[in-house]
Image (cartoon, rainbow, N blue to C red):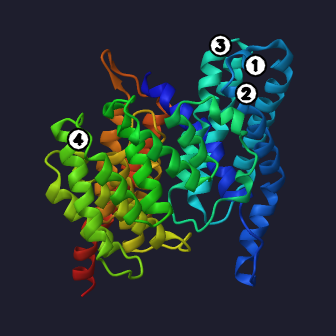
Amino acid sequence: MNRRCCVREGRWLAVVALVTAIAGAGCAESEAEAEAEADRAAVRAEMGVIYGSLYTLLPLSVDDQAFRSPAEREKIREALASLAKGAEHVADHVAGDDRRVHYLANALSRETREAMLRFDQERYEGAQFLVRRFTDFCVACHTRVPSAADSPLAAGFVSADTLGRLPTAQRATVQVATRRFDDALATYEKLFASKAVAPAEMLAPLMEYLRVCLRVKNDVERPRNTLMGFATRPDLWSNLRGDVEDWIAALYRAAETPSDPPSVARARALLDEAQRVMRYPTDRRGLVQQLLASGELHRYLEGRAGKSGPDIAEAYYLLGLIETRTKLDYIVSEGEFYLETAIRLAPGDPVGQAAFDLLEEETVIGWTGSSGSHMPEDVRAHLDELRALVEAAALVEAAAPSNTSDAR
């Protein structure tokens, strides 16, 4: 699959994050929240339409015969059309200081009709694939910050019969996507204990399992015990065994760390620790430290929407950096959003320059294939806009000392 398809699918999947971000929002409890509540109210009706569409589409997506059935065609077409329309309305109406939601809204408004186009052209496999990939972005959103309990929306979203038809790993992903975290962890643990599944097929599930344990459940003991059992498997190759042993050691250290308020400094220290154990940029041995650092940064940013400052810009940059290091194939990544946010918050700061350098490299490499670069004009123009912002800010910074000297 090429980069263009992955990006389209990622933007299409963004609708799920918006369902969670807005439909799950509570009522304002103070005057300070009144303006944000007004913004949420403007799109709440559209969120209801979007949620209803997802409720219809997801179960059908796991039934090949039903998805292609003429009897279901009108229902699927109507759900896709409603979803596309709702996405456009959200993109038009969302406001306020939540830059992440605004980013997702703009992304989904450009791409939601792609899945409907495939369905209309009877490219059922492609349309069905997109619907199934909703869960990827759900997971990305739901595993950002701790959650004390499962969402009440989870009940009945996907029936037990539907879940039972899915492979074990995909079943766990859907459970995470619908915020059934305890069920998901139990499903993952069942997968890891299975002798019928090769360890090579468990790399992505292992990473997602650790995301849920560390960022959602804030639990280091459960994954440590699970990994200790997994490490006894005789069919692990040496590199994976080394990864697991390093993860276990990192979890022991994390259990001994005092529970202090989240900070960028502590996240930075965790990333430094990860760097010390990583032998090459994509090495998995620093995964636990990176996930702990990302959880630290998400908790730090929570409640700071709309604020700025060097620490906030660095937090977004570090989140983008972590995403580039821990992303999986075809899994939706918000790394581009984090890096762009860091650039816009501090274009003249070294953090902003570092964020742009990483974003530029990820973008260029992502759109380059065996036959050369295929970067769309709008993507290139967006990158040029950010480059100009950084360069202009750098000129201002460079001119500042001489201007001060002249004034004296």
Q: Is residue 224 visible?
A: yes
Query: The residue tagged with tag 3: helix, strand or loop?
Result: loop
Residue designated by label 3: 123
Disc 1 residue type?
Ala
From the viewer's perspective, is residue 380 above or below residue 25? above
Please state which of the two labelled residues, at mark 4 or mark 1, is closer to the viewer: 4
Mark toward the start of the polypeptide (3 vs 4): 3
Report how far apart the C-alphas of labels 4 and 1 lie in the structure: 40 Å
Give the residue at x 61% y 16%. 125
Q: Which mark is residue 66?
A: 1
* Residue neighbourhood size for the residue with mark 2, other residues' Cα within 10 Å, grouped as few (<14), some (14–19), many (≥20): many
Seen in the image, is 57 located left or right of residue 347? right
Looking at the rendered image, the disc whose residue lies closer to the viewer, 2 or 3, is 2
Q: Earlier in the sequence, mark 1 or mark 3?
A: 1
Q: Are marks 4 and 1 in contact (CB under 8 Å)?
A: no
Look at mark 4 in the image and give the residue it sits on.
Answer: 240
Measure the alpha-carbon separation of dots 1 and 3: 14 Å
